[in-house]
Amino acid sequence: MKQIPICSPKKRNNRSGFTLIELMITTLIFAVMTQLVYNALFTTIKANRVVNYSFDIPRKALMLSKLFERELTGIYLPEIIPPPAAKKGTKRKKLSKYIMKFGLIGKEREINFTTLINLDETKEPAVGDILEIGYEFDSGDKALIKRVDPYIDDKLEKGGDETEFKMSLESMKFEYYGKKWESSWDSVKAKKLPRAIRISFELVEVNERDQYTEEEIKAMAFKHQILVLLPNAVDNKKS
């Protein structure tokens, strides 16, 4: 009996690589996972910025408030005392050729004053510790410039060393209360100090301002107001 040979089927060739459908599915899964990771990372960064903004901006506002309150409450305006009358037949001698201006000269974005204060906060101010201090808000650079002059002279608005504070200020305005709120004050001419000073300012923490519109920046502004009563607000006696 003849044996019939059985032919074995041909083996299939082993496949290498991926098909087009598999590549598309893999790409889709990778894109979805990337989007999920990006969203989670973006949300975390945004939440971190919100938390930092919530704590940092009020902290800056409080620091600025304490600084103004400490210096403005020490505004010094000495009472004008007339010099002694000269004897008959003699001329009155000048006590000093060196003229000193005390008080406050303020505008809407600028304030200059003499204050009885010590630069060292750990010590109490002593008699004669009078400084000439000025603040000016630069609306262009959004910076607050402070000027300190330890020598009192006849120029209340000039002199001393300047320090620039960049603390996310968007706007700042000074107002002065006599019988009503005014945008300027000159105690040299008025011979008296205002009874109160009101400082209004806005803080905005924006790193890249080009990404936001003016309306969005205004919406993010942290508005704060300081009201300082002047204990030394007395009228000077005219000589």
Image (tube, grey):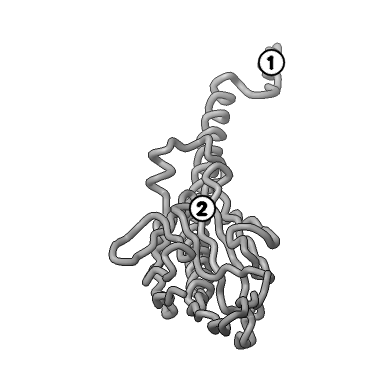
On residue 95, the disc is: none
Residue drawn at point x = 38 percent, y = 62 percent: 176
Q: Camera-side residue: 24 or 222? A: 222
Residue 44: x and y in percent read 51, 52
**In the shown orientation, is residue 148 left or right of residue 63?**
right
Q: Is residue 80 visible?
A: yes
| Residue ID for mark 1 | 10
Q: Nearer the viewer, mark 2 or mark 1?
A: 2
Residue drawn at point x = 38 percent, y = 39 percent: 215
On residue 169, the disc is: 2
Q: Residues within 10 Å of mark 2 (few under 14, many from 20)?
A: many
Residue 234: x and y in percent read 40, 77
What secondary structure is found at the residue carrying circle 2? Answer: strand
Residue drawn at point x = 56 percent, y = 41 percent: 208
Residue drawn at point x = 69 percent, y = 15 percent: 10
Q: Is residue 169 above or below residue 198?
A: above
**In the shown orientation, is residue 112 left or right of residue 1?**
left
Q: Camera-side residue: 48 or 89? A: 89
Residue type, numbered disc 2: Leu
Residue 67: x and y in percent read 53, 70
